[in-house]
């Protein structure tokens, strides 16, 4: 009887939390943001405004008699549940429809069962999303993936046939077309945060807290674990995705695809769609690449890649 | 309390809008008044235009007095007169009402019956002609509208453009006014002095002949042969010659269109419309010069000022005050050496990369959602 009452009470609370969180998620100012950025926004909003929110949220209409810590825990759980509901649907679509894994045959000699690989990837991504470190570091690359930030640049890279092209096709010796390369980078973006499989709240040895760069030994360690867990995923893809967390300043042997992924994953962080650039300001991409050029050592970017991407953005007014 | 202030601000907005409309209308009226003289429009239309000018000047004088009153009540008289350019409000209203549209309207209202009634005012009208130049100062009033024009959103840009326009037009107006005064006081040759000189010669010739009635009558019989500007001759208050009937004068002549000579009971009226036309032509040329100057400042200088000063500063301000604003200042190569763009270069190359580096370590994302967005579910107060 008591258990039943407790269950009823919990479900009422969940309903209230869900309606409150849905209200926040539905805010027009968040509508253009990818789901993980929305989640980050709400978590931060709750943290910052705890003092003002507590009187209302502890009133009879919401969670009477509960401490802020309890309320916060309920709300965070609800936000994550709500985000996951959306995110997992999106990931499902991303893996099954939006990425054409035909590129796999150009990077793996052995015959890969694409469908099994998709299932494996999807299950893996859903699983690692339970880790806060992964969630936090997934936002940038996921935004880049969702907003197709790489596509138009890859088109230009393929047309110009300059440094990045040379690095991809002569140094890394990729043998694939434009479409395949685009899909390859997209897959890299989704797998990049898997490096956090072994991290614990940014205190793990081997990770630069600020710049997010990782040491080679660390990625190798994760790679060895992952290659056993993701048997259907080509090793080249796994390695490239993990290596996108390395600093090119420290590891000159980092694959071109990893370096490109690193830049665009970073571009996705705090990305905001700008409908109209103000008079007197440079375009968003041009500005971003120029700032990145100045901080390339800090983030471990390949300066020559940034130079080329900057030129592309400047010439196209992006 | 807030209702009252809302009401007050509504009245203020209405009043300011009314002033802007009046400024635009008075510029049209000003142009038409001179254009009507040049085109020889019917006196009735010219009269109406002159009277409407009087009402505009009256309106602007009242506006100036109201603003001055409120400024003095708030102990901001000097602020209003100097910083808010109240002196323009003054020069574009009070002197014009007192020395231009006021006397002209009185002359029009007194035009009444005979030419003699008007003659006493004619000399005053010469002064008026010089004052009329100051009417273009009204253009400075449209500086008030600058804020509503693209490229001039910033207060600083508005102030700079207003200042440069004011200086240019004021120098133009007062130079021309000074030249006019100098010209008449030094007796330098001009259309007016040439016409009046010729008329004076005729008047002296007639005066010579007027020693006997017979001689005067003979001269007047042949008046059409030696002059077409002599309109009316009076001897001892009695009209002894008139080129046209009174109706024609009423329809085609206004104050300032006559010149008047008198000696020993002999009074002569001459047609001076050519002087009025020349003066109006000069006014219109000046009107167009000032109009083009104002338009040039708006069309060419405002965007230039915005692009080279206020826009980059605005971007820098946003980048420094808003966490998520990381757009660089666009630096035009032609102006890269300007002080503003040198600062912008530092902002682009030093400040933004540093800001980016420091914000990377922060856990807090840039918040797009605020408390006010959920205000409806929070208790009031």
Image (cartoon, helix red, strand yellow):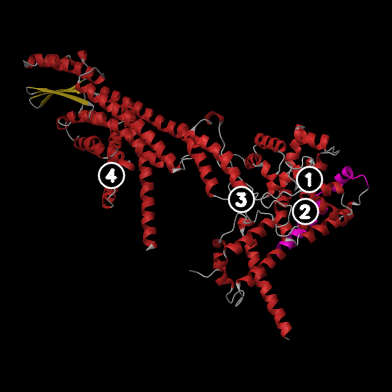
Mark 3 and 2 residues: CB-CB less than 8 Å, in contact?
A: no
Q: Which residues are magenta?
A: A82-110
Q: Report the side of A50 relative to B49 (left or right).
A: right
Q: Chain of mark 1?
A: A
**Closer to the observer: label 1 or label 3?**
3
Residue B95, position as x, y percentages in the image = 24, 37
In the picture of the structure, the residue carrying the numbered disc 1 is: A185
In the picture of the structure, the residue carrying the numbered disc 4 is: B78
Marks 3/2: CA–CA distance:
22 Å
Up/down of A114 relative to A249, above or below: below
**Closer to the observer: label 3 or label 4?**
3
**Closer to the observer: label 2 or label 4?**
2
Q: Nearer the viewer, residue A270 or A228?
A: A228
In the picture of the structure, the residue carrying the numbered disc 2 is: A195
Dot 2 or dot 1: first in sequence order is 1
Q: Chain of mark 4?
A: B
Residue A98 magenta-highlighted: yes
Q: Report the side of B105 relative to B303 (left or right).
A: left
Labels 3 and 4 positioned on one and the same chain? yes
- The structure residue drawn at horizontal position 78% and vertical position 59%, both measured from the top left corner, is A128
Q: Estimate how packed mark 3 is, as few (under 14), some (14 to 19) or many (20 or more) residues with alpha carbons within 10 Å.
A: some
Labels 4 and 1 positioned on one and the same chain? no
Marks 1/3: CA–CA distance:
26 Å
- The structure residue drawn at horizontal position 48% and vertical position 37%, both measured from the top left corner, is B309
Residue A126, position as x, y percentages in the image = 79, 60
Q: Which mark is residue B359?
A: 3
Q: Report the side of B375 relative to A15 (left or right).
A: left
Mark 2 and 4 residues: CB-CB less than 8 Å, in contact?
A: no
**Closer to the observer: label 2 or label 1?**
2
- The structure residue drawn at horizontal position 60% and vertical position 63%, both measured from the top left corner, is A47
Labels 1 and 3 positioned on one and the same chain? no
Marks 2/1: CA–CA distance:
16 Å
């Amino acid at each position: 009887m008591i258990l039943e009452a407790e269950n009823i009470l919990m479900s009422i609370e969940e309903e209230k939390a869900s309606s409150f969180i849905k209200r926040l998620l539905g805010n027009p100012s968040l509508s253009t943001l990818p789901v993980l950025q929305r989640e980050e926004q709400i978590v931060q909003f709750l943290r910052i405004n705890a003092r003002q929110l507590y009187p209302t949220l502890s009133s009879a209409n919401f969670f009477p008699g509960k401490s802020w810590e309890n309320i916060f825990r309920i709300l965070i759980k609800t936000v994550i549940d709500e985000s996951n509901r959306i995110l997992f649907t999106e990931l499902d679509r991303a893996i099954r429809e939006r990425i054409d894994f035909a590129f796999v045959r150009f990077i793996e000699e052995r015959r890969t069962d694409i469908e099994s690989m998709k299932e494996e990837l999807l299950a893996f991504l859903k699983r690692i999303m339970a880790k806060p470190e992964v969630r936090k570091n997934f936002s940038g690359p996921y935004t880049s993936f969702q907003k197709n930030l790489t596509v138009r640049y890859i088109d230009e890279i393929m047309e110009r046939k300059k440094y990045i092209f040379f690095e991809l096709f002569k140094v890394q010796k990729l043998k694939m077309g434009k479409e395949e390369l685009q899909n390859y980078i997209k897959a890299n973006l989704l797998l990049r945060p898997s490096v956090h499989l072994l991290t614990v709240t940014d205190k793990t040895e081997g990770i630069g807290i600020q710049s997010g760069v990782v040491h080679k030994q660390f990625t190798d360690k994760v790679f060895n674990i992952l290659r056993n867990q993701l048997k259907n995923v080509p090793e080249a893809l796994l390695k490239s995705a993990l290596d996108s967390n390395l600093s090119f300043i420290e590891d000159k042997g980092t694959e071109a695809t990893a370096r490109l992924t690193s830049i665009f994953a970073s571009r996705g962080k705090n990305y905001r769609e700008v409908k109209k650039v103000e008079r007197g300001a440079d375009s968003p991409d041009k500005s971003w690449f120029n700032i990145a050029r100045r901080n390339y050592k800090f983030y471990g970017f390949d300066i020559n890649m940034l130079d080329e991407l900057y030129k592309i953005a400047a010439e196209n007014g992006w | 309390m807030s209702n009252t202030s809302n009401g007050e601000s509504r009245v203020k907005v209405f009043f300011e809008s009314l002033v802007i409309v009046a400024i635009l209308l008075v510029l049209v009226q000003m142009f038409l008044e001179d254009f009507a003289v040049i085109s020889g429009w019917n006196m009735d239309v010219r009269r109406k235009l002159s009277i409407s000018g009087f009402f505009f000047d009256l309106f602007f004088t009242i506006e100036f007095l109201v603003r001055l009153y409120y400024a003095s009540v708030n102990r901001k008289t000097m602020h209003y007169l100097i910083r808010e350019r109240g002196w323009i409000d003054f020069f574009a209203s009070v002197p014009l009402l007192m020395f231009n549209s006021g006397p002209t309207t009185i002359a029009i209202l007194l035009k009444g019956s005979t030419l003699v009634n008007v003659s006493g005012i004619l000399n005053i009208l010469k002064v008026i002609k010089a004052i009329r130049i100051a009417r273009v100062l009204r253009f400075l009033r449209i500086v008030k509208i600058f804020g509503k024009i693209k490229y001039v959103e910033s207060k600083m840009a508005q102030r700079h453009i207003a200042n440069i326009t004011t200086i240019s037009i004021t120098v133009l107006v007062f130079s021309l006014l000074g030249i006019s005064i100098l010209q008449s006081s030094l007796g330098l040759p001009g259309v007016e002095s040439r016409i009046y000189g010729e008329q004076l010669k005729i008047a002296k010739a007639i005066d010579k002949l007027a020693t006997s009635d017979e001689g005067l009558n003979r001269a007047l019989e042949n008046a059409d042969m030696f002059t077409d500007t002599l309109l009316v001759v009076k001897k001892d208050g009695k009209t002894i010659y008139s080129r046209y009937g009174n109706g024609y004068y009423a329809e085609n002549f206004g104050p300032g269109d006559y010149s008047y000579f008198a000696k020993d009971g002999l009074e002569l009226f001459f047609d001076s419309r050519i002087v009025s036309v020349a003066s109006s032509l000069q006014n219109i040329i000046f009107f167009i010069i000032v109009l083009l100057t104002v338009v040039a400042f708006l069309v060419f200088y405002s965007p230039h000022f915005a692009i080279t000063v206020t826009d980059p500063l605005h971007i820098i301000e946003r980048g420094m005050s808003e966490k998520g604003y990381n757009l660089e200042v666009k630096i035009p190569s032609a102006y890269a050496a300007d002080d503003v763009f040198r600062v912008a270069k530092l902002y682009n190359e030093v400040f933004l990369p540093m800001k980016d580096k420091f914000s990377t370590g922060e856990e807090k994302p840039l918040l797009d959602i605020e408390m006010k967005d959920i205000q409806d579910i929070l208790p009031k107060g």
